[in-house]
Image (cartoon, coloured by chain):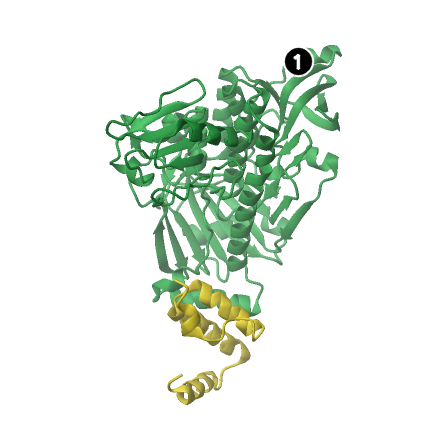
């Protein structure tokens, strides 16, 4: 992941000063934008499962995506 | 649903006619249909066209009070046209294919549900339920159907190989027996409650207001849906055009709304005034404050009794999947009963009603539930994601896919139907969306339309091959030959030799790259539940 520290800091910074509700709404917009960037519905559904119960989805993104189109 | 308005229109009155059955001698009928709504009427007319005389009983003496079902989907139009009321629907109804979704006062996106030429029927025709019932009742009368008004079903008794029905009428009660009974008696089905069969599913807490308003307005004939409009802040609104200058307004009221308070005319008038502006004169035609459920019976058949339409399953109105799903139930069952009564079917044919229509109901319930969840999010993350989709959708086309104002009724594909013959592995794969199980897609054919050729029996569509021995029509199978070019060929991926088999309800049952009488015969047997 390139610019990992920048991303982490930008995420924290984006939420600075926001109330709980505003934060949740910001995250929701970001998640939909990211889902679109993933561009593969099966993969997005697998990632949602991974977030719910870490360890259930294929870990290696690009490799596992090769077989899905 | 609680109806509080009185329609201005005067419904036709269908009189009670004293049946011979009141002499005390118990008669027997092949089929009894309970409920003369759109589903029961469609089932009884379909059976009559197939040579089965059903007796149709209804406790009322007129058509629907209020417009209720208004969006008749393409597949329903095709079915109702086959039943003989196409010209009336086309002459009276409001054709629409397009919809618009607004967020606040901004247009989020527009959609076209039928963005191609070459179909007899549009995506939708809006028409009041009472007209659909009136046309079907007139058709039933013209066909000599035994339609008994003011005849209330009181009880059913399982006879093992049939049903005994007890009814009451203004001139007394009587009973009769029948081989099959079709419960088309709606969400409060007497047949269902008499058997104690429970619905399974969800209730939604939000209340909605339906107001049908008579006014001269210049909105186009399209579906308009608003999230959080300026005239109804924080809620949703829906506008549909109907015939006779009547407009359907559907307003979300929220879970805490008091239904009696909301149904007061002055309350309704002020809400509508906020929507249409201060200057347009209007009359209230019909008002209803309602909540809804998405639920179904576990089984749609119990012995010799079948459940159709709202008696079997209910959905929210968003997506127009209730009445349209019910009409597809009738279309699905009528030919199966007729083939069975004629002795041409195996028991698997009637079993396939559940195999085909339960997944169809589940698809409608799933879509309808998801639309409702999007419109009435339960706070927290649900609301945050709904609002995120709406906020992003103005600038990002992808986000419009998430915006769910109702996924509008499309015919159930009946994928995996036991009546369908799977494609053969050998031969070129088929392109396009048509596949065995699906309702035939229309196309121009000769001077008319392809679906008009599929008028009630098994049918074969054969794309000609040079020098090939084509199929010939028989009593059991009508054959239609077409050139392997043009819209019909492209929609069925028709190449020289390509052959499609259609069931009496116009759904595809099998397809091949070459015509082979033995394979066709086997597929017809399978579609009749004989193998």
- Percent of width and height locating residue B15: 60, 18
Question: Is B136 displayed left or right of B427 in the figure?
Answer: right
Quarter assignment of residue B37: top right
Q: Write down the chain letter for disc 1.
A: B
Q: Among the chains, which one is green?
A: B
Chain A shade: yellow
Q: Which residue is at 38% across, 20% downward? A: B473
Q: Nearer the viewer, residue B87 or B466?
A: B466
As displayed, is residue B457 above or below residue B128? above
As displayed, is residue A8 above or below residue B484? below
Quarter assignment of residue A41: bottom left
Identify the residue position indicated by label 1 in the image: B18
* Mark 1 burial class by Cα count in 10 Å: few <14, some 14-19, many 20+: some
How many marks can you see? 1
Q: Secondary structure at mark 1?
A: loop
Q: Which residue is at 36% across, 21% downward? A: B472
- Percent of width and height locating residue B477: 42, 23
Q: Quadrant of the N terminus of chain B?
A: top right
Residue B3 appears in the rendering: no
Q: Nearer the viewer, residue B521 or B506?
A: B521
- Percent of width and height locating residue B382: 54, 66
Q: Nearer the viewer, residue A55 or B183?
A: A55
Q: Nearer the viewer, residue A34 or A18?
A: A34
């Amino acid at each position: 992941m390139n610019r990992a520290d920048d991303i982490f800091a930008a995420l924290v910074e984006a939420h600075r000063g926001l109330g709980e509700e505003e934060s949740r709404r910001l995250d929701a917009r970001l998640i939909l934008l990211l889902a679109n960037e993933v561009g593969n519905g099966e993969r997005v559904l697998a990632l949602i499962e991974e977030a719910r119960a870490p360890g259930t989805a294929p870990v290696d993104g690009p490799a596992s995506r090769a077989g899905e189109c | 649903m609680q109806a509080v308005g009185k329609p201005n229109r005067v419904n036709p009155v269908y009189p009670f006619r004293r049946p011979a059955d009141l002499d005390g001698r118990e008669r027997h009928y092949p089929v009894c249909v309970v409920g003369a709504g759109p589903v029961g009427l469609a089932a009884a007319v379909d059976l009559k066209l197939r040579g089965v005389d059903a007796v149709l009983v209804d406790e009322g003496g007129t058509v629907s009070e209020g417009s209720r079902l208004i969006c008749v989907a393409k597949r329903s139009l095709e079915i109702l046209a086959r039943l003989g009321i196409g010209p009336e629907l086309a002459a009276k109804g409001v054709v629409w294919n397009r919809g618009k979704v607004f967020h606040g006062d901004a247009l989020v996106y527009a959609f076209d549900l039928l963005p191609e030429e070459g179909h007899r029927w549009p995506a939708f025709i809006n028409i009041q339920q009472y007209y659909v019932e009136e046309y079907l009742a007139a058709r039933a009368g013209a066909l000599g159907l035994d339609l008994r008004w003011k005849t209330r079903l009181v009880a059913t008794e399982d006879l093992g190989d049939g049903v005994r029905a007890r009814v009451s009428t203004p001139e007394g009660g009587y009973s009769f027996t029948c081989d099959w009974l079709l419960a088309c008696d709606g969400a409060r089905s007497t047949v269902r409650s008499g058997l104690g069969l429970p619905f399974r599913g969800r209730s939604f807490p939000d209340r909605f207001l339906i107001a049908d308003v008579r006014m001269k307005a210049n909105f186009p004939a399209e579906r308009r849906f608003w999230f959080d409009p300026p005239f109804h802040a924080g809620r949703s609104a829906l506008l549909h055009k109907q015939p006779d200058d009547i407009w359907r307004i559907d307003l979300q009221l929220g879970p805490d709304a008091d239904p009696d308070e909301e149904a007061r005319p002055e309350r309704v008038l002020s809400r509508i005034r906020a929507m249409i502006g201060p200057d347009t004169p209007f009359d209230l035609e019909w008002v209803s404050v309602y909540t809804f459920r998405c639920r179904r019976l576990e089984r749609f058949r119990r012995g010799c009794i079948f459940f159709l339409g709202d008696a079997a399953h209910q959905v929210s109105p968003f997506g127009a999947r209730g009445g349209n799903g019910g009409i597809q139930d009738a279309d699905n069952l009528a030919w199966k009963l007729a083939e069975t009564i004629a002795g041409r079917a195996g028991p698997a044919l009637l079993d396939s009603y559940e195999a085909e229509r339960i997944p169809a109901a589940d698809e409608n319930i799933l879509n309808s539930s998801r639309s409702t969840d999007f419109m009435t999010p339960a706070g927290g993350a649900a609301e945050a994601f709904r609002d995120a989709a709406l906020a992003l959708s103005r600038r990002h086309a992808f986000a419009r896919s998430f915006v769910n104002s109702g996924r509008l009724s499309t015919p159930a594909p009946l994928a995996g139907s036991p009546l369908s013959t799977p494609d053969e592995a050998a031969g070129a794969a088929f392109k396009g969306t048509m596949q065995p199980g699906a309702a035939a897609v229309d196309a121009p054919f000769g001077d008319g339309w392809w679906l008009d050729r599929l008028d009630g029996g098994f049918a074969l569509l054969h794309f000609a091959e040079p020098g090939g021995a084509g199929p010939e029509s028989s009593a059991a199978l009508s054959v239609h030959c077409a050139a392997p070019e043009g819209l019909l060929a492209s929609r069925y991926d028709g190449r020289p030799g390509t052959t499609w088999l259609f069931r009496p309800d116009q759904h595809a049952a099998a397809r091949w790259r070459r015509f082979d009488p033995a394979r066709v015969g086997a597929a017809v047997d399978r579609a009749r539940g004989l193998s």
